[in-house]
Amino acid sequence: MLTLDYANCLAERVGNHGLDRARLEPGSELAEAATALTARLDKTRGTGWERWRDLPCGETRSAHTQAIHALVQERQGKFENLVVLGIGGSALGNIALQSALNSPTWNLMTKEQRDGHPRLFVLDNVDPTAFAAVMDVCKPESTLFNVVSKSGETAETAAEFMWVREALKTALGDKANDHVVAITDPAKGTMRQICDAERYATLPVPEGVGGRFSVLSPVGLFSAAMCGIDIEQLLDGAAAMDERCCQPDLATNPAAMLASLLCELASRKGKTSHVLMPYANQMYLMADWYRQLWAESLGKENDVDGETVYAGFTPIKALGATDQHSQIQLYREGPNDKVIGFVEVEKFDQDVTIPAGLGVEALTYLEGRSMAELLAAEKRATEYALVRSQRPNFTLKMPRLDAEHIGEFISLWQIATAYAGLMLGIDAYNQPAVETGKKATFGLMGRAGFDEWRAKVDQVLAPTDFVI
């Protein structure tokens, strides 16, 4: 199972920049507080905006997976491409799952090599060059479009969908609706109206599941299943981690411990920047998913009582060993305001042996060794270097990169986020700062009822002489 090694966050390893071991021991104030929060989360799980806790298990899981498997069986083998239209939580999880669990060259493989599964493209921005390039490759006749939007009014996704709908109608006429699967609100909203009118196949965005907590719902699972990922194993891993994170003892609850470490190191030691640095390319885009989860959930101006607190941490992604040659200089000798989280993979599905015979004495130490060995040594060496500089760090160790352990990883960070929200005294499920930008965009694009927002933007951003 996935494990959390936090020894390098303790004072005995990193001096005054770490936490005293006694603060984490049974009976300590921190341990007692974590136990109380575990009981609180147990009472609220499955209610309000914490309904995401039920996604990996029980009736919720059964209902979702049955619908997904049925739709995948119906559409499988009929399309060369699957294009996901979404943004933020409606796209980051899809990208992360594909990157972590399928080949890095998936879209370059033949259909036979992909066992009949489609290529996957996730369009999570309205950059016109990127959008047009994908549409040039993904012809309507051979493409299934998966539009993900709870309301249907997210400007970026709506714009992409409107273009795709027109292209499908032009190319396929009455058969266009067979090329769309929408994941949206099951009962209401603009996209629901569109789907009912156009007779699109749909899957639900579950009630009470926010975008950044939705990857284990149909939002992330449909595209994963279409591309051959074992979603049952994924949910099994998430459920197993959820069970571990219900333990009242801080020492046996990975999510409570992870949240406690990061919140304590921030409040007591000023470590407000949190780096996630996987030593595996396949996990790099999972760090993008983590960044949204950690930033949007915890970055809040006000606490639950309305007091101004400016809470939150800055999530940063890095890649080992690549960023040893880019960012580690800063992390070791720059401001000591970071906690570095490593992700280590114990066994890769493939390994590469470094051959002998080059005849260069300085490189003979590499001969006959494997790239996995080298990557592991790079991680351990970096860990050592950070400890030498008294820089707190921890390691999430994954036995291998498969669906079960990715499910554990996702569940761990989601539950840790719930703990951290309570520790900070903020609402981890809203995002008021994001709404301002949405409303301003509506105003600038001429949406009825948002004229005042255009006026506000024009007033604040009036032309000045400060341009060279």
Image (spheres, rainbow, N blue to C red):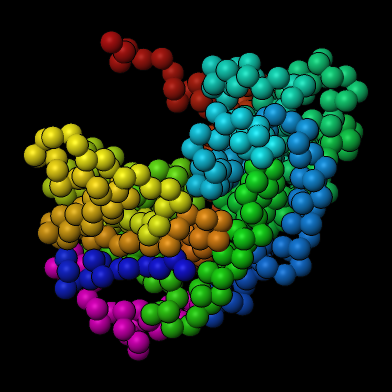
The C terminus lies in quadrant: top left
Of residues 241 and 211, the one nearer the viewer is 241
Q: Is residue 463 visible?
A: yes
Of residues 256 and 69, the one nearer the viewer is 69
Of residues 165 and 103, the one nearer the viewer is 103
Q: Which range of residues does the magenta coloring cover?
A: 15-38
Please, which residue is most extreme toward the bottom here?
Answer: 27
- Is 207 displayed left or right of 169 in the figure? left
The mark total stands at: 0
Q: Which residue appears at 59% of the width and 43% of the height?
A: 94
Q: Position of residue 55 (x, y in %)?
A: 66, 62
Please, which residue is most extreme toward the front here?
Answer: 357
Q: Is residue 299 visible?
A: no
Q: Which residue appears at 59% of the width and 77% of the height?
A: 42
- Is 332 displayed left or right of 23 in the figure? left
- Is 383 covered by the magenta stretch? no
Q: Give above or below for 181 relative to 342.
A: above
Q: Position of residue 154 (x, y in %)?
A: 65, 35
Please, which residue is most extreme toward the left here?
Answer: 361
Q: Which residue appears at 71% of the width and 19% of the height?
A: 139
Q: Which residue appears at 17% of the width and 58% of the height?
A: 384
Quarter residue 396 falls in: bottom left
Q: Position of residue 424 (x, y in %)?
A: 42, 64
Q: Position of residue 328 (x, y in %)?
A: 21, 45
- Is 21 covered by the magenta stretch? yes
Q: Give above or below for 232 relative to 165.
A: below
